[in-house]
Amino acid sequence: MAGADLVLRDIHQMPAPSWWPPAPGWWLVIAAVVIVVASCIAWALRRRRRRAMIAEVFDRAVRSAATPSAEVAAMSDLLRRAARRRNPAADRLQGDAWLAFLDGGLPPRPPGTFSNGAGRLLLEGGYQRQVDAAEVAALRPVARALFLHWMSAK
């Protein structure tokens, strides 16, 4: 009975694996997530910078115009250049066809903004000696929004 004095201990479990350092697969997952997040941030910054540069082109051209009729002419020229991105023959449209094309450019705007509203100034405002500055001021944000939309689109 010498074995009765022997103290037996229970089976020892291995300690739980440590959470640090992670397994190699987790390092790959972390690297992939970092790459995706960094790429999304870089893409968003690049897009924002490009939009700011396009807005600056519009603003500089309109600001450099000496008279309200020159502002209208500058906006018309910029819109015609931007329209070529949408349809190569759009810059050759004249009159109401041109205004109808502009109306179809930016959906959230009320229909007829160019055909029946401030945009009608684009038809002959650039050729008139005197143009009402209030009409030009009403046209500027609409033309700028359409220019930014067309130039920012791929």
Image: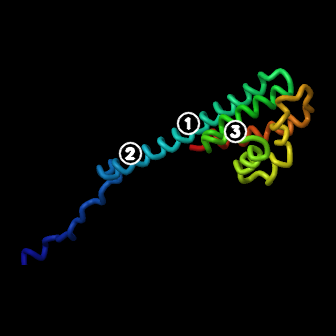
User: Does 152 sit left or right of 65 as displayed?
Assistant: left
Label 2 Cα neighbours within 10 Å, binned few <14 / some 14-19 / many ≥20: few
Q: Return the x and y of residue 91 as percentages of the image width and height.
A: 67, 38
Residue closer to the observer: 28 or 76? 76
**In the foreground, 1 or 7:** 7
Which label was assigned to residue 147?
3
Q: Which residue was labeled with disc 1?
A: 46
The residue singled out by tag 2 in the image is: 31
From the image, which quarter does the C terminus lie in? top right
The quarter of the picture where residue 1 lies is bottom left
Q: Earlier in the sequence, mark 3 or mark 2?
A: 2
Q: Position of residue 135 (x, y in %)?
A: 89, 37
Measure how far apart labels 3 and 2 are at the Cα level: 39 Å
Three-letter code for the amino acid on which mark 3 is drawn? Phe
User: Marks 3 and 1: which is nearer the front?
Assistant: 3
Q: How far separated are the C-alphas under marks 3 and 1?
A: 19 Å
Q: Nearer the viewer, mark 3 or mark 2?
A: 3
Q: Earlier in the sequence, mark 1 or mark 2?
A: 2
58 lies above or below 29: above
Secondary structure at numbered mark 1? helix
**Type of the residue with mark 1:** Arg
Instruction: Please tell me whether mark 2 sits on a helix, a strand or a loop.
Output: helix
* Residue drawn at point x = 71 percent, y = 53 percent: 107
Q: Earlier in the sequence, mark 3 or mark 1?
A: 1
Residue extending farthest to the left is 1
Query: Residue shown at 61%/44% (left/top)?
Result: 87
Which image quarter: residue 145?
Answer: top right
**Neighbourhood count class around disc 3 (C-alpha, 10 Å): few under 14, some 14–19, many 20 upward:** many
Place of residue 41 in the rendered image (x, y in percent of width and height, measured from the top left): 53, 41
Residue type, numbered disc 2: Ala
Q: CA distance from mark 1 to mark 2?
A: 22 Å
Which of discs 1 and 2 lies nearer the camera? The answer is 1
